[in-house]
Image (tube, rainbow, N blue to C red):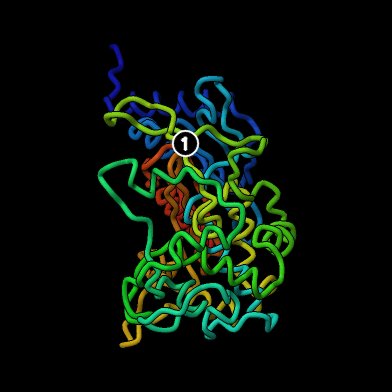
Amino acid sequence: MRKIFPARHLLSVFLAAIIVLLALQNGHTQTDSRYNNAVEKSKEAIAEEMATHKLPGLSVAVAVDGKIVWSEGFGLADIEKKVPVTTGTRFRIASTSKPITATAMAKLYEQGKLDIDAPIQKYVPYFPEKKEGIITARQLVGSLSGIRHYRRDPDPAKDEFFSRKTYYETTKDAVREFENDPLDFVPGSQYGYSSYGFTLLSAAIEGASGEDFLTYLQKEIFAPLKMHSTGADINKKIIPNRAGFYSLENKTEIINAPYIDYSISWGGGGFISTPEDLVRFGSALLEPGFLKEETLREMFTSQRTSDGTPTGIGFAWRVIEGKNGLYYYHPGEAVGGRSYLVIYPKQKLVVSLVHNLTGGSLNAGVKVSDIFIEEIDSSSKK
């Protein structure tokens, strides 16, 4: 008798074939054999997600207890040239830049060089005082400052998410773009997400350290943590392994993403990186060492508004109690890509996923996290 396979089995076979093809194309994979089962399940979830949401290229890395146990690239970094994604492909990480900037602030805080509750003018004297109230670094890192976010507009030419075409030579030049705007609310009174707030925080880091913002991050964050593929997404520079950036037209056709310059907000959303670098960064925050215990406690404790309402945000990180326990999380969305970085302290798990499509789904990152948590939790019970 002829054997009949159910449709879902055929789909699984098809997805598995895609996974094998992508793996053969991309190479540079890294896998700890103890997690083979979790890796195979994760590959299926990624393949399905890429097909469903038309993601051109994607990269993922998973670290457990400070060690990278899986890292792999899928799809294409450059569609026109058929360049495959590898673990070294650099993607725009958008707002996942914020926890990195917050960590630079924390370093200066530990060193006694930056009082996070002092008026910001102590470190950025050229920033005008505001009639709405005093702004501090603590408020900036928790989006409690009242500094506005990007202005959105139906007209792409006026939409700041898409239309920023000026290269800002200095942080001071970038701050000038919003320094005279009124605050959206009294500082500390409510939560208001703001990438420009991190531009002002970057200026405060310069003032406190006496160094250029990007230079300080390279010396104090990227180099010590061996984040060799992380830095500013400077358009005019030749940056090896930088991915191509794409968007969807009419939700169906993949096109080249529009040109954009992120120099107005390096610290809030302008870095490129790899998942391997990002999980190295996240792993450094799992326990005291790179930062002191008391600093980590503040970083991962929700701030509160002036009336005592928790915001769910510490030093940039979202602090969430979920089905798998407490976790710290930050996503990012840029023109031409999205990023995902999560830390599960109980399981000592750090997961990062990035891709190169504007507005594309990050669900694969959530699925990979859930799969590895299940694997870790089940192993600990044996």
Residue 178 vertical position relative to residue 74 in the rendered view, above or below: below
Q: Residue at x 39, y 43 (%)?
A: 162
Answer with the quarter of the image where residue 109 lies: bottom right
- The location of residue 346, given as percent across then percent down, is 51, 69
| Front residue (pair 97, 211) | 211
Q: Which residue is mark 1?
A: 259
Q: Residue at x 28, y 18 (%)?
A: 4
Residue 105 vertical position relative to residue 48 in the rendered view, above or below: below
Residue 289 vertical position relative to residue 55 in the rendered view, above or below: below
Quadrant in which the N terminus is drawn: top left
Is residue 6 in view?
yes
Is residue 38 in view?
no
Residue 120 vertical position relative to residue 159 in the rendered view, above or below: below
- The location of residue 381, given as percent across then percent down, is 50, 64
- The location of residue 105, given as percent across then percent down, is 60, 72
Q: How many marks?
A: 1
How many C-alpha atoms fall within 10 Å of the one at disc 1: few (<14), some, or many (≥20)? few
Which residue sits furthest top? Answer: 1
Q: Amino acid at mark 1?
A: Tyr
Q: Residue at x 69, y 70 (%)?
A: 290
SS class, disc 1: loop
